[in-house]
Image (cartoon, rainbow, N blue to C red):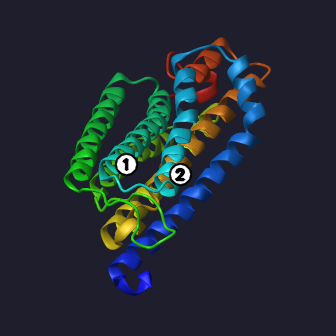
Amino acid sequence: MQAEYLSDTDIAAATSLQTYTYICTSMATFWTYDYAWSLQEEWTFLLGSRWTKVKGLYIITRFMPFLVIATNLYLNFTPTENTNKCQTLINMDLSFGIISATCSEAFFVLRTYVLWNNNKFVLAAMLTGFLGVLAGSIGTCFTAYNATAPYATSAVPGITGCSSSANLYIPFILLFALQLGLFSLTLIRAIQNWRTANGTMYTVLIKHNIFYYACGLLFSAVNVLTLLLLEYQYRSMLQDLQFIILAILALRMHLYLWQIEHHTAHSSDALVSTFECVPLSHISSSEVGTV
């Protein structure tokens, strides 16, 4: 009996890998359901809106999670004894995840810029933090993965997949710091204008930003804790889920803003420009209020 020769470590590692596989499968199901549910609205937006840079960002943000999920499923369901192949697949999954998270955060950097009335100093501060977090995350992620060789298929028969013991808590701490900074900027702006700004678009932007950053902060904090406190593949089980949830929120919120503008009978040209190609023009003063 082969099971008699398996150590407790082998069994624990295999169990964590199987749990991770279940989460990846659930994540793929959830993403597919969300895509099917919003398909008609999304095509209306894609065909009815002008082609802009933010529209291109929307398309990239929509399809990057498909690559994350496809790579995850291949990692977990394809048996392989080749550690180099495992390393390549894990690096691909990491790259797709970073791109997906970057696109999602970019939406809300632009939204915060609009809330601050296209303030160049705020934009410079946000871009500095954004690019710093991105560079730091890329450097620490690939350094950690390349320094820790992944182990291939589980020793337990019937459980497949690649995994790595690399600990990636630093990128999530950096992401937490970025989201906390953007969250603070949104709150400051909301407090400054709470008596004078009562436009629909402004209210939606504030609510969306706060909800998105709250979810992002929660997921980042949970990921830091799981990475520091758990072992084996348990520590990685929520990483890609965070990227998927953030992408869904960014896409849904952008689509909702476009629908509000599209169905508003008295929208001005400034509003059309603002919410189709954020932040290439200023928000209408009638909509935002005194800023």
Determine which quarter of the picture holds residue 51: top right
Question: Which residue matches tag 2?
Answer: 73
**Residue 184 image point, x, y percent:** 40, 46
Mark 1 or 2, nearer chain start: 2
Disc 1 marks a residue whose amino acid type is: Ile
Disc 2 marks a residue whose amino acid type is: Leu
**Residue 241 image point, x, y percent:** 51, 54
Determine which quarter of the picture holds residue 151: bottom left
Front residue of 108/134: it is: 134
Lateral position of residue 13 relative to residue 210, left or right: left
Crowding at dot 2, Cα within 10 Å, few <14 / some 14-19 / many 20+, comes out as some
Against 205, residue 163 (above or below) is below
Q: Is residue 191 visible?
A: yes
Crowding at dot 1, Cα within 10 Å, few <14 / some 14-19 / many 20+, comes out as many
Against 119, residue 134 (above or below) is below
Lateral position of residue 156 relative to residue 252, left or right: left
Q: Is residue 246 visible?
A: no
Tell me the quarter of the image containing the N terminus: bottom left
Disc sitting over residue 90 in the figure: 1
Residue extending furthest toward the front: 1
Query: Residue, x 63% and y 26% (percent of image)?
Result: 287
